[in-house]
Amino acid sequence: MKAVDIRQLSKYYGKSKGIDKVTFSIEEGEVFGFIGPNGAGKSTTIRTLLNFIYPTSGEASVFGKDIVKDSVEIRKLVGYLPSEIHYYDDMKAVDLLRYSASFYGHVDETRMKRLAERLDLDLNRKIENLSFGNRKKVGIVQALLHQPKLLILDEPTGGLDPLMQHTFFEMLAEEQQKGVTIFFSSHILSEVQKVCDRVAIIKQGELMQVETVSNLTGSRFKNITIVLEPTAEDYEFQLDGIVHQQRSGHEYKLLFNGDIKSLLHEVQQIPLRDLRIEEPSLEEVFMHYYEK
Amino acid sequence: MMIFKREFKRNMKSLIIWSAALSALVIVMMSVFTQMSEQADLIDQLMSAYPESIRSAFGMDTLNMATVLGFYGVEVYTMTTLFGSIYAAILASGILSKEQSEKTIEFLLSKPVTRTRVMTEKLAIVIVNLLIFHIVIIGVSALSFVLLQDQEVDWALFALMSCALFLLHAVFAAVGFFLSSFMNRGRTVMSTVLGIVLMMYFIHIAAGLADSISALQYITPFTYVDAADLLETGSLNILALTIIPIVIVVAILAAYTIYRRRDIAV
């Protein structure tokens, strides 16, 4: 049985498109990435799966259960971490978590404490006094506490510092070991690459492609910024793998997917002042990925 | 029961404040009656201080202000109907829309509960809070009749007025609940429903003052539970017994129908 099976799912808000005929499925136990720029329809898809919003057409099921008819049954099996955390301000973190857990039957206090400890979260603070990152941690504990079979994570790392992100990914790996399916939505390509087996790419409400991560990472695009000394003469880079070149004054911007060693070799020969090598934005990769 | 418990706690403070404030109002007004009934001519003075049209608008011409229920009808009941309606409207309109405006609804709906269940537990809170509110203010009124004055009280008539009070407040609660089933912003819902209450009250008063618009009085529930009418006839108006319950049932059913089918987006 598929953990998530989406078939020709569309959601229109009046005339404006949320998602259009999205089709993909997630195997049980898989870590599945869902990437696309902001406003591409990631949250719309998730909200439809959880029946916050009704599909305009098409259908979908989670563990074989229909998202509209069997929504309550589905939500018993799902842990959901929204991209923006909004909880009751008057509650302490611990009250919120107990309230949340009470809907699933019983409150596993030991698991709650253990999860909070790992994330370095003080459960006795009032939610209104928590920082953005700490609220996110409450959200993470809330999503994991009742041991769901499917985790739906919408932009889960926003607000977490790098150390916490590391802990968080460790926790996800442990959940996966236990057979939990993870649906990981993000606009950050690198974190999706890090944890996911496969990814679905969505853009302007339409599914572009479902790819294995190894295929995606096969294209090693880098954004290279090279600044030359003010005295330097005009220079033309002649390297294999330069997809796109742009120059303003002594600053050269390259989109590069060639051999990094030959690039470094070349920059050694020129009057270099500064060099930056960055991950290109998702948009840039997609643009070139799909042009081919 | 989780949502019920949670909402009970959350709404406790405003229940206490509103009950205490209206109880205080009842006690103050009834002690005025105590003082006045000792000097009967004071009441006549008080009455003649109002222009005749005002007297008729508030039913002072037909109500005998020297009797305890007559005074209660004019000075207390008119206040409790208005302020109680405001409380009922705020309570009921906030109960759903608050989750929406504070964006906590996504949390709640990601739990394994149906929307019907969410609404039912929240509606139960409205009903329970309204019941407690009425028990307090009706109880305080009854106590004040016993303790603050020595006339005989027609308890059956008082019970009738109390039922009318509850019916009136219930209809505004139902309207508030209905509005919050599709309006997203807490503040918009609250100002809309407060506007409705005040408008209805105003129409009730205005229709009593000017004969030319007296037909308008039938659109406001305040007319159906008018104190002068109740005390004169000794029974609840047939319109109060039919139209008000129908409006309550329709508003609640409509709220369920809309809320269960709509998109909840924050």
Image: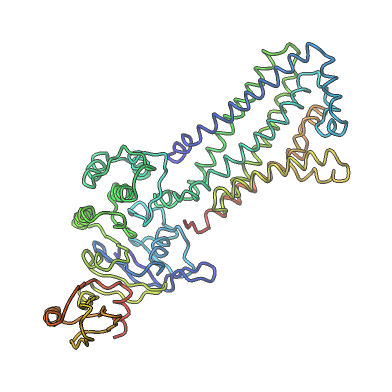
Residue at left offset 60%, top offset 50%: B179
A257 above or below B52?
below
Residue A199: x %, y % from top left: 28, 70
Residue at left offset 41%, top offset 57%: A70
* Colour treatment of the image: rainbow
Q: Nearer the viewer, residue B18 or B151?
A: B18
Residue at left offset 70%, top offset 25%: B159
Residue B4: x %, y % from top left: 47, 38
**Dividing the picture into quarters, in which one does residue B190 lie?**
top right
Q: In this view, does A198 lie to the left or right of B244?
A: left
Q: Quadrant of the N terminus of chain A?
A: bottom left
B204 above or below A257?
above
Q: Is residue B20 left or right of residue A148?
A: right
Q: Nearer the viewer, residue A163 or A174?
A: A163
Residue at left offset 71%, top offset 26%: B76
Q: Which of A3 and A284 is in front in this view?
A: A284
**Count the marks: how many?**
0
Residue B38: x %, y % from top left: 78, 11
A131 above or below A158?
above
Q: Is residue A184 left or right of residue A49?
A: left
Residue B49: x %, y % from top left: 84, 25
Q: In which quarter of the image is the C terminus of chain A?
A: bottom left
**Dividing the picture into quarters, in which one does residue B74 lie?**
top right
